Amino acid sequence: MINIGLLIVFVVLGAGLGVGYNFLVIKKYPEKRRKANYVLTVIVFLIVTAALFALLSVRAFVSSTVSEKSQMLEQSIKEKYPNLGLVKGGIDLTGIDKDVSKANNIVADLRAVLPSNTELKIGARTYNFVSSFVLKEVRKKLMTANVSGKLSNSFADENNLLTISSLINGLKKSIMNVVNIVILVFVLIFVIILLSHVIKSLAIASKERKAGT
């Protein structure tokens, strides 16, 4: 859900920065180019701040959704499969990187107990994408444990046991790491757009100032 108050803050901030930048830099443009660039600058600042707001909102929504669905998933598995190794006592991961069958069995068990998309109340496409990612991530991490037996992106608890809780916590971190990287890429794109406008406008303003001296 959109935070209207925060949206207003970002819009006001973008407009204010645009107007301030016009006063400091764009007013030094040649007169025939000044009005158009006044408008362009405000638009650029508004777009960038609106994009940052949208990205922060998306991240907050994804984080909240992942936490909510993770809790539902963990509770559902514990209730339906109390005798599953992941639930009952956990699975010792020591030496698992040398035991392909053990890793495959864990992934197979997880695949078998995953609730359906209707149970988790998410779309089929989203469910298929996330479940495929989850299973691949689990298997990859199980098979890339380091020499001490600890997982490189630990899904295990402090006793090197894989439990349903430690597994889901590890998956939450993995999913949010991917989300954070995607968000960061988009942030950098919009920062580059803003910097390009700033650098170009400063160069034009500097050239005009030198021409006037």
Image (spheres, helix red, strand yellow):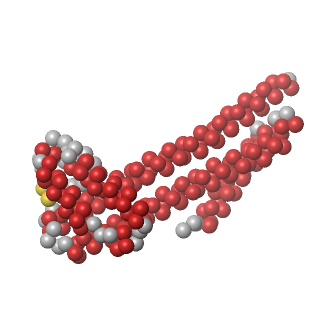
For the image, the number of numbered tags is 0
Vertical comparison of 93 with 206: above or below: below
Residue at the image point whose x is 66% and y is 51% from the top: 47
Q: Position of residue 34 (x, y in %)?
A: 83, 40
Name the quadrant containing residue 163: bottom left
Q: Position of residue 106 (x, y in %)?
A: 18, 58
Q: Is residue 212 left or right of residue 116?
A: right
Q: Is residue 186 among the parts visible in the rendering?
A: yes
Q: Quadrant of the N terminus?
A: bottom right
Q: Is residue 18 left or right of residue 101?
A: right
Residue at the image point whose x is 54% and y is 46% from the top: 187
Residue at the image point whose x is 77% and y is 32% from the top: 205
Q: Is residue 26 left or right of residue 124?
A: right
Q: Nearer the viewer, residue 106 or 11?
A: 106
Q: Quadrant of the C terminus?
A: top right
Q: Nearer the viewer, residue 135 or 174?
A: 135
Q: Is residue 160 among the parts visible in the rendering?
A: no
Q: Is residue 37 left or right of residue 166?
A: right
Residue at the image point whose x is 54% and y is 54% from the top: 55
Vertical comparison of 86 with 35: above or below: below
Q: Position of residue 174 (x, y in %)?
A: 34, 52
Which residue lies most toward the bottom here?
A: 79
Q: Position of residue 179 (x, y in %)?
A: 43, 52
Q: Nearer the viewer, residue 134 or 149?
A: 134
Vertical comparison of 38 with 5: above or below: above
